[in-house]
Amino acid sequence: MSNYRKQFLICDNIKMSATTVHKFITFIGLLSILHAAYSAAQHRSYLRITEQEFTTLPIDILIQGIASLFMVMYGVMYIAGDFKEIRAVVDLENKSWETLRNLPSFQIFNHRGRSLRRCNTYESNAL
């Protein structure tokens, strides 16, 4: 096996492991968000039982929720892949005028003109 091929395989394995790492980070982030939500619900029920007034969540639940939110956002950004430009000009720059006017969603081939044409051919054959 050539040296170049070995380097390519190593780089390919690193890319696959990076995707696996990002999926793992997203999964841990989702679990952490669920745990923060469960902790918040448990804290609210504790306050109801002890008849205390709810003012705010404890700081550890807030930090856990925000940190896990950023973990999920980071993982999803790398799992989703490259983003497309929002501006339509970027997509339309490579198209010619003929392809811009071609709207396949408006092309209808199954319409009443086909049956009218059949009637005309029958009439012309009868004459």
Image (spheres, grey):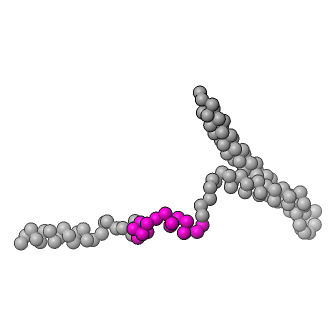
Q: What residue range appears in magenta?
A: 86-102
For residue 110: magenta? no
Considering depth in this image, is 6 or 13 the residue closer to the camera? 6
Q: Which residue occupies the extreme front position in the image?
A: 3
Q: Position of residue 96 (x, y in %)?
A: 43, 66
Side of 107 where 28 appears, left or right = right
Q: Where residue 51 sits in the image (x, y, percent)?
A: 92, 66
Quarter holding residue 98: bottom left
Picture quarter with the N terminus: top right
Q: Is there any visible trace of residue 43 in the rendered image?
A: yes
Corner quadrant of residue 80: bottom right
Nearer the observer, 34 or 2: 2
> Eyeballing the image, is 43 above or below 127?
above
- Please give the name of the residue rendered at 9% of the width and 68% of the height, measured from the top-left corner: 125
Q: Is residue 6 left or right of residue 101?
A: right
The answer to whether any part of residue 42 appears in the image is: no
* Relative image position of residue 86 (x, y in whole percent): 60, 67
All told, the count of numbered labels is 0
Q: Residue at x 66, y 43 (%)?
A: 15
Q: Residue 50 vs residue 2: left or right?
A: right
On-image quarter of the C terminus: bottom left
Residue 106 lies in quadrant: bottom left
- Outermost residue to the top: 1
Q: Residue placed farthest to the left in the image?
A: 127
Residue 18, how many percent across, how many down?
Answer: 69, 44
Question: What residue lies at 51% left-to-right and 66% top-to-bottom?
Answer: 93
